[in-house]
Image: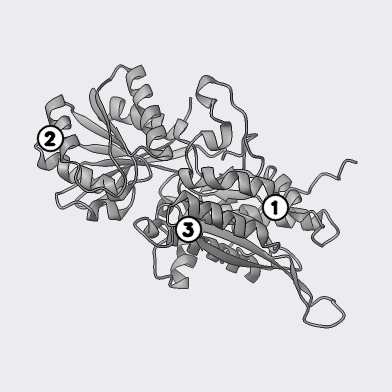
Amino acid sequence: MRHRSLLIMTTAITAGALTLSACGSRDDKNDSGGKDSKTTVVIGVDAPLTGSLSALGQGIKNSVDLAAKIANKNNEVDGVTFKVKSFDDQAVPSSGKQNATSMVDDENILGAVGPLNSGVAQSMQGVFDRGDLAQVSPANTNPALSQGDDWASGKKSRPFKTYFRTATTDIIQGRFAAQYYYKDAKKRKVFVIDDKQAYGNGLATIFAEEFKRLGGKVVGRDHLTVKETDFSGIANKVKSSGADSVYFGGQYPEGGLLSDQVKQAGAQVPIMGGDGIYDPAFIKASGTSNDGDLATSVGYPVEQLDSAKTFVKNYADQHYPDPYAAYGGYSYDAGWAIIQAVKAVVEDNDGKLPDDARAKVTEALGKVSFDGVTGKVSFDQYGDTTNKQLTVYKVTKGAWKSVKSETFKD
């Protein structure tokens, strides 16, 4: 039989903080289960909470926690209290898969935020799908996660109905970076390097194809290994190639060292990367000045968005030990999307969660639409965000400064 259409909520972010937590247990404050009876919904969070990428992971976890706290404070979903349960994947796919299994096995979890890394997401998607548990990543950018392995040939097919993301894909980010390098920075000869991971390799490939399409030349292509520290061989290749620029697909621990060693080799050229290097830790990882290095990141600078002012204030008021970092706004919006999906399901089921709550939450997520921290939050037929805002940042006097923001158009 056909179910009644879900009530889709269009909600503006209000002052305060949203709280993410989900569990399907009842918290009865009186024996009769009257007005004081609450259902607890738990929202799982998977991110690298320890290790070299923990600066980003902690920001993800805290931002979802903030989202949950405000949903509860504002009684966003009548009769429901949200809680957050976090899992550390250490940026390791096998750990992510184990965490996904643990979340699926916990019947109180009705949605998950994360992970950070596209490679980790690949190991989790099938587990979540089999458990009918929706995930919303605030940071994954690999196109194959939502559009299938044949996306580049134009044969797009959504692999898992439970997968969503609030960050735009590398199809957009890689092309945006190439256009900035060629049109704005006037670069013509680029040396492309990646870390052989799903995110880094995919981003570098998309960048290289767009740079060549625009008329630029890729004068060299090489790969480095994650967690290694000596990239002098690649740095010397960059120097001898005559490149006027470098593009790196990877994360900030290797990116900062690569920038350092390229300059030490005598190639005084900028290095540009994606959102994986957009973190203060990229600058700290280098012993040589990074001034002039560039990074793209999804969305507009949170601090410059009117829609984010309340989030920034509320985050500061919580006195979290770590900053919200690059993905804080997207993590908050990912958590709020799950909260709005739960709200739609509850209101469509006479004020209570149905027995098939996970499946209903997944269905409702596809129809969610609200004004979030990062702008309009909604998802297309692949589960991808409809928000295609991006920003280029440049290291200036030892700090990242935004130099260009725009909504990408094909």
Q: How far from the left and from the top, in percent, is residue 396?
A: 22, 48
Kindly identify the residue that appears in the image at 76 percent across and 55 percent down: 357
Q: Earlier in the sequence, mark 3 or mark 2?
A: 3
Residue indicated by mark 1: 341
As drawn, the label of residue 60 is 3
**Amino acid type at image mark 3:** Ile
Q: Of the numbered discs in the image, which one, if any, rests on residue 185? A: none
Question: Which of these two is toward me, 51 or 333?
Answer: 51
**Neighbourhood count class around disc 3 (C-alpha, 10 Å): few under 14, some 14–19, many 20 upward:** many
In front of the other: 39 or 222:
222
**Within-10-Å neighbours for mark 2: few <14, some 14–19, many 20+:** many
Are circles 3 and 2 on residues that touch, CB within 8 Å?
no
Q: Nearer the viewer, residue 135 or 381?
A: 135
- 287 vs 98, left or right, is left
Q: Which residue is mark 2?
A: 267
Q: Position of residue 364 (x, y in %)?
A: 72, 47
